[in-house]
Image (cartoon, grey):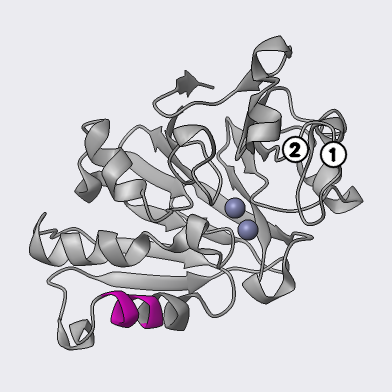
Amino acid sequence: MEVRFIGSGDAFGSGGRLQPCMLVTDNETRFTFDFGVTSLIGLHQQKIDPNTIDIVLLSHLHGDHCGGVPFLLMDAMLGSKRKNPLTIIGPSGIESHIKQLQELLFPGSHIMEPKFTVKYLEIDSKESIQFGKYKVSAIDAKHTVTTNPMSLKIETDKKILVYTGDGELTETLIDFTDKADLVIAECYYFDKPIRWHLNYPDIHNLKAKKTILTHMHQNMLNHKDELPEICAYDGMVINI
Ligand SMILES: [Zn+2]
Ligand SMILES: [Zn+2]
């Protein structure tokens, strides 16, 4: 399983980094965790064909995490001429949220009919989704409540991959990372506790075998070279 950071930044371009998007490739299947406004740009920068993505998994409704989906869909219809199905998995209300976003960004585009299947699936903490050999599950995250925030997990019979999304440390999140081969953890601030986010002192509570830090504010980026943890950057590729 390969994880490629298309974007390792936060909402506001800290460090000149693109918004959150992690591309997970496992044999013939491709997921992304999140798809920020800049993610289509990032895919092209890294010479990744957007049509090769099968599933977009969205952690919550903030624009830096899902605001790029209308661009992905419009490009699929007009530019990339996508033919293969696309599945979008996200929190409660994801389909209407993306459709509203698309209509705001591209007025009148609701009349366009994609020539490929777009399937929306809602996920919550009660039920996992089986997608071929992949089990996708979620827990509620402690983040801005109106964004329906979740942390996400992909499991196969061999690997477990967790993405925290945005949110404070909770006992549920600690348990969710137990036995994971990798947790991709947001790490917003280094030494100042900030509400609704994981910060550097919280990271040490996560239980995964390996942790990669992302979604870093400049306050955190200032310290990244002095830390033992792996800090993501745009274009970073790791295999688990
Ligand atoms: Zn964010
Ligand atoms: Zn957020």
Residue drawn at x 23%, y 84% is 107
Which residue is the site of mark 2?
A: 189
Task: Provide residue 199's location: percent of width, then percent of height.
Answer: 79, 39
Secondary element at image label 2: loop
Which residue is labeled 1 in the image? 192
Does residue 129 appear to the left or right of 31 in the view shown?
Answer: right
3D distance between C-alphas at marks 1 and 2 = 6 Å
Q: Position of residue 78 (x, y in %)?
A: 9, 65
- Is 25 positioned to the left or the right of 154 in the image? left
Q: Secondary structure at mark 1?
A: loop
Quadrant housing residue 14 = top right
Quadrant of the snapshot with the C terminus: top right
Q: Residues within 10 Å of mark 2 (few under 14, many from 20)?
A: many
Amino acid type indicated by mark 2: Tyr
Q: Is residue 103 magenta?
A: yes
Which span of residues is magenta-colored? Answer: 100-105
Which residue sits at x=64%, y=41%? 162
Q: Amino acid at mark 1?
A: Lys
Q: Position of residue 136 (x, y in %)?
A: 57, 54
**Would residue 183 be visible to someone looking at this image?**
no
Q: Is residue 121 above or below residue 72?
A: below
